[in-house]
Image (cartoon, helix red, strand yellow):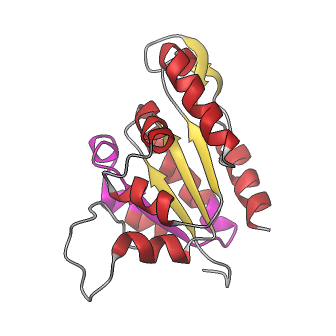
Amino acid sequence: MTNRKKPVILGVTGSIAAYRACDIISKLRKENIDVRPILTKEAMEFITPLSVQTLARNKVVTDMFALPEEWDPVHTSIAQEAGLILIAPAAANIIGKLASGICDDILSCVVFATKAPVLIAPAMNEGMYRHKIVRENIAKLKDIGYKFIGPIKGYLACGHEDIGHIARTEDIVKEVKRLLR
């Protein structure tokens, strides 16, 4: 079910919206797009590598320092194979790391090592999203060419509706397809 194009690397970060990564993977696979998932340590508090691997039909990368089956500098090999890096959901933490040049996990290292486009789908509490530092970090990443989709107004884990809800799956898939052209 994979196409000849380079795969989409899906980075999943620590957000209650991490469960949406499963839907995104399923919809991308239906579009014949090869998905290679990366889960941060925080993402694994919300979803399991087994669920993600089953849907993606590809190994899930969770640890930069796990011993590979054969010699392979994991972060650079993943970065080189990417047709696109999608971070969905993107918590304020990963946005801050990327804007500050911090490479302390497999996802941030892959992003910095790639030449592929990067699409970020933020998901967080409205207070976090509206925080001046988060807004400045997003602007900084946009200035260097990173693309963003959402967030949108929706029901948040804190119990009310506001901005910070991850973009609709269909919109994310549509943007991925557009960027892969």
Answer with the quarter of the image where residue 178 lies. Answer: bottom right
Q: Residue placed at 54% from the left, 21% from the top?
A: 129
Q: Residue placed at 53% from the left, 76% from the top?
A: 80
Q: Quadrant of the C terminus?
A: bottom right
Q: Residue placed at 49% from the left, 26% from the top?
A: 124
Q: Position of residue 151 (x, y in %)?
A: 63, 30
Residue 49 in the magenta stretch? The answer is: yes
Does any portion of residue 166 appear in the rendered image?
no
- In the image, residue 17 above or below residue 83: above
Does any portion of residue 174 appear in the rendered image?
yes
Q: Position of residue 83 (x, y in %)?
A: 63, 70
Q: Is residue 174 left or right of residue 55?
A: right
Q: Residue placed at 52% from the left, 25% from the top?
A: 134
Residue 70 in the magenta stretch? The answer is: no
Q: Quadrant of the N terminus?
A: bottom right
Q: Position of residue 123 (x, y in %)?
A: 52, 32
Nearer to the camera, 78 or 58: 78
Residue extent of the magenta highlight: 28-52
Q: Position of residue 42 (x, y in %)?
A: 30, 42
Nearer to the camera, 16 or 54: 16
Q: Is residue 116 left or right of residue 72?
A: right
Answer with the quarter of the image where residue 38 lies. Answer: bottom left
Q: Is residue 122 left or right of residue 117?
A: left
Q: Farthest residue in the bottom direction? A: 70
Nearer to the camera, 155 or 70: 70
Count of all numbered marks drawn on residues in the image? 0
